[in-house]
Amino acid sequence: MKKKIIVAAVLALSSGVAAAQSGEKQGWYAGLDLGYSRLGIGGGDIDGALANQGVAGSTSIDQSDKSYGISGGYRVNRNFAVEAAWESLGSYSYSSPTATDTISGKLKADALSLSALGIYPFTRNWSAYGKLGITRTSTDLTAGSASGATAVSNQSGSSAGWLIGAGLTYDFDAGYYTKLGWDRYERVGDSASTGKGSIDIYQIGVGMRF
């Protein structure tokens, strides 16, 4: 009888270990992301926003910057998770010469998002994922006159949009993970006040599962 109990306990323990090693991960997780951002809002978009303040210029704007953010979610099973995140999408300097002056400043954006993730574990530790979500972005366009003679003011805009993404995740046995991913934020900004377009984020992240 004792032998049967011991054998049953060993089998139960073995099945539990096997399930843990097979990628059946569930529960909460949280992480930090750092990356490189690529702006899809061009000088012509800034021209349009400045034109609404009565400024006629020809704008050049930086197209890349750093990004960072935090994310957290719940992994329902090995193939599906729900995730919320906040991301700084970058700060991009611009300059807009006019006939008599130069207007300059920065375009800054950040976003809140809620996404669904489809996950495909192809080894015990490695997984690929795809992401689809909704976003709420806040965008600021600062503006200043080099001579002080042109009346311009800072503008802000917010918008709802889509988030799509994909990447790879590596799970360490201690409950930590790292990821390499790409996210695209659509409909960032407001065409009337800040300019409007997309921003791509290429990031590396680290996090912990609870």
Image: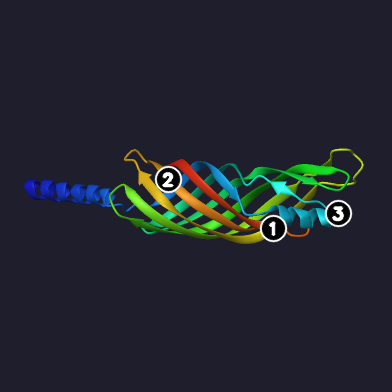
Q: What secondary structure is found at the residue carrying circle 2?
A: strand
* Mark 1 or mark 2, earlier in chain: 2
Q: Amino acid at mark 2?
A: Lys
- Percent across and percent down for residue 167 are 43, 52
Q: Say which of 43 and 114 sits in front.
A: 43
Q: Quadrant of the C terminus?
A: top left
- What residue occupies the far front of the structure in this picture? 99
The answer for how far apart the CA atoms under marks 3 and 2 are is 43 Å
Q: Amino acid at mark 3?
A: Gln
Crowd band around label 1 with a 10 angstrom C-alpha radius: few (<14), some (14–19), many (20+): many
- Percent across and percent down for residue 166 are 45, 55
Residue shown at 47% from the left, 42% from the top: 205
Q: Which residue is mark 1?
A: 196
The answer for how far apart the CA atoms under marks 1 and 3 are is 16 Å
Q: Is residue 81 left or right of residue 114?
A: left
Q: Which residue is mark 3?
A: 53
Q: Is residue 179 above or below residue 136?
A: above
Q: Amino acid at mark 1?
A: Lys
The answer for how far apart the CA atoms under marks 1 and 2 are is 29 Å
Q: Say which of 115 and 105 sits in front.
A: 105
Residue shown at 86% from the left, 54% from the top: 53
Q: Say which of 202 and 78 sits in front.
A: 202
- Percent across and percent down for residue 171 are 35, 44
Q: Is residue 194 something that shows in the picture?
A: no
* Mark 3 or mark 2, earlier in chain: 3
- Percent across and percent down for residue 48 are 78, 58
Q: What secondary structure is found at the residue carrying circle 1?
A: strand
Q: Is residue 63 above or below residue 193?
A: above
Q: Which residue is mark 2?
A: 179
Discs 3/2, front = 3
**How many marks are shown on the rendered structure?**
3
Q: Are marks 1 and 3 in contact (CB under 8 Å)?
A: no
